[in-house]
Structure formats: structure tokens, C-alpha cells
Amino acid sequence: ANANANANANAGPRLRLPTLRSRSKNGRMSKKQFSSYTTTINNNNNNHNATKARSTNVESFSTLKDRLVQMEKEVEAGRGASATKIVRELQEEGLLGAFSRAEGVPKRSYTLQDLRLNKIEPAALLSPTENYLEKVSTYCQRAYVAGLLSTYFVYHWDATQVFYLLAFSLMMLTVDKVGYNGGIEFLAVDTIGRWFNKSYGVRVSRHEAGHFLIAYIMGVLPRGYTLSAWNALKYNMTLSVQAGTSFCDEDFQNEVASGKLTSSTLDKFCCIALAGVAQEFIDHGSAEGGRNDILQLDNLLQGLGFTQKKADDQIRWSALNTVFLLRKNQETIAALSEAMMAEAPLSRCYAIVEAFDL
């Protein structure tokens, strides 16, 4: 008896289980009571495992947040290769699941009928026309002419004063066209257009969100974005730029410089270039912005010496693949567009695509 007592004393603390009192006469558990007893033990074990999992997730989340901020700093410093390296490391650690994980349509030759069967009208998607800003520009010109006439008839300026004002205006327009490629005029038109129509700003933000998302899930890290001509001037000191998204595309630039562009790199570039007009097509049934994207893509394919059929096959697959990927991720586009309109940092945008909340 003493030996058993010593053994029990050295065994350490025991797990205290809930006590179940039997109602049976022989003092044994009934089948119902035994089931309740085992359920209680399993619930305790599950709660312990859940608590441990939550602790692990919190640590992983904290690590991910710190690394995304570090990645953002590398991008802003112009070290795109270092930022991409961090992304690869996070992938290996299992903390990122969206980067370079796009699962699109098979790469093959598609006809125009194939696109239409997937509710894609090629002409509406690939022929963007900036109707709204052209209307704003026309209204501004009419307002200017009305102002000139009012100076003469209302404020009674003489003809010489009106002539000098007109000559000065034409001279400034000429300087803008020659020296800044029309950037000052475009800045004015873009800013006025946003004042009078808020939906225009939303359209631009969703256009750029399309570029951002497709680039990220196809393995090209976005470097930055602007949503207006004013922001482009404010942050990048550039004129005649409406909006845009830049990327860490050193690999692409190196391949272009070497004259050896791989098929996978070309596929990425084509899909990223078409992402903006594709998102506008999904939203409105046609595209307005993105004319420069289409021109750059055409120039690239011509520079690579593509035949017309080969170029058509590449464009059709890219359009189908891009629309397919965007349609699957419209909730992400909405969240990303909202964040970009709020001028969210890159780390926040990366987290949205990865479905994390920083």
C-alpha cells in the first residue's frame, strides 16, 4: 500500500475529468452516459487544438504583416528584385497563396466565335474610345468661347483686348502641345471631369485594380499606382498621364533587351496589358480607357515579328483568359478599387489580393 502511494505521488498531477454519476443500480455507466462522457472529453481536446491553432495563426499573421511592409519598402526604394524575392520566400513558408497562382483557360488557338460564346465581344473590348473626357474637353472649349464673347458684350472689352487674350491662350496651348505633349490641358480636363462625374473616378480605379490584380496573380509584383493626372503629377512629376500601374518587371525588360522573350513572359505581359479594358468591358460592356495599353501590345507583337494569325491567336487567348480570371475575382476587384481610391499603401493592396485584413 505504501509503495502504491509513493508511486502515485511521483506520477505528477493528473488530468481531472468530469465526474459522471451513474443512475444504474450496479454503479456502472449506461450507454447514454458513456456517450456524453466521451463527447465532453472530445470537446475539451478540440478547444485545446483550436486555441493552439489560433495562436499559430496570430504569429503567422504578424510575420506576414511585417514582411509585406518590408516588401513595400523594397518596392518604393526601387529594389524590385529584392521585393520579389521576399514574395517567393513567403510562398515557400505557406503564407501567400495568390501570387503567381492564376488558373486560367488552356493556351490554344481561339476563334472570335469562341470569345462570343463566353460573352466577350472583341470589338467592344479591344477598341477603347474615351468618350467622356472628349465631351468634357468639348464643353471646356465652348465655355472658353462663351467667356471671350462675354468679355466683349457684357464687360465691354474692346476688340484689341479680346484679341490679345485669344492670342495669349493660343500661345499657351501651343507651348503645352510642343513642350508637354498636351499634359497641362489633359490635367485640366481630367480634374474637371472628376469634379462633375464621380463615376468616372470609380471607373478609372476599377480599371487600375484590374491591372493590379492580374499582374499579382500572374507573378508580376505591382510597384505602384496612380488614379488621376493630378496624382501622377504630384507623386511622379509626370504630365499627360491619366492613371497607371507600374510593375517590378525587370525580368521582362531583360528578356526584351536580349531579344529572347519567352512564351510565359509574353503571356503575362499580354494579360496585364488587357486587364484594364477587360475590367471595363465586364462593368460596362465596352471600354473607354486603355487605348495606350492596346497600342503598346500591338507594337510589342509587331516588334517580335508575329504574323497576323499568330498575333490574333495571342490576343484572343489573352482576352479570354483575362476576362475569365477577372470574372472569378470581382469581390477582390471591388475591395481593391475602394482601397486604391483611398490611396492605400501597397502592403494593404497586396493583403487584399491575398484575402487578408491588415
Image (cartoon, rainbow, N blue to C red):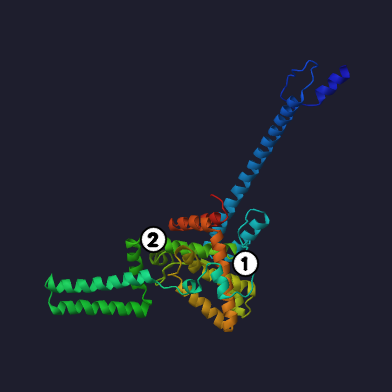
Q: Which residue, given by chain and number where applicable, does mark 2 sit on? A: 199
Of callouts 2 and 1, the N-terminal one = 1
- Dot 1, crowdedness within 10 Å: few (<14), some or many (≥20)? few
Quarter of the picture containing the N terminus is top right
Q: Which residue, given by chain and number where applicable, does mark 1 sit on? A: 105
Closest to the observer, 333 or 147: 333
Counting from the top left corner in percent of width and height, residue 216 is at 57, 62
Q: Please, what secondary structure does the residue beneath circle 1 have?
A: loop
Quarter of the view holding residue 154: bottom left
Disc 2/disc 1 C-alpha distance (Å): 32 Å
Q: Does the residue at mark 2 contact the one at mark 1 (Cβ under 8 Å)?
A: no
Left or right, 323 with reference to 88? left
Name the kind of residue labelled 1 in the image: Val
Closest to the observer, 44 or 16: 44
Counting from the top left corner in percent of width and height, residue 208 is at 48, 64
Left or right, 182 with reference to 17? left
Name the kind of residue labelled 2 in the image: Ser
- Dot 2, crowdedness within 10 Å: few (<14), some or many (≥20)? few
Which mark's residue is nearer the viewer, 2 or 1? 1
Quarter of the view holding residue 72: bottom right
Q: Residue at x 51, y 63 (%)?
A: 210
Q: Please, what secondary structure does the residue beneath circle 2 have?
A: helix
Counting from the top left corner in percent of width and height, residue 296 is at 50, 76
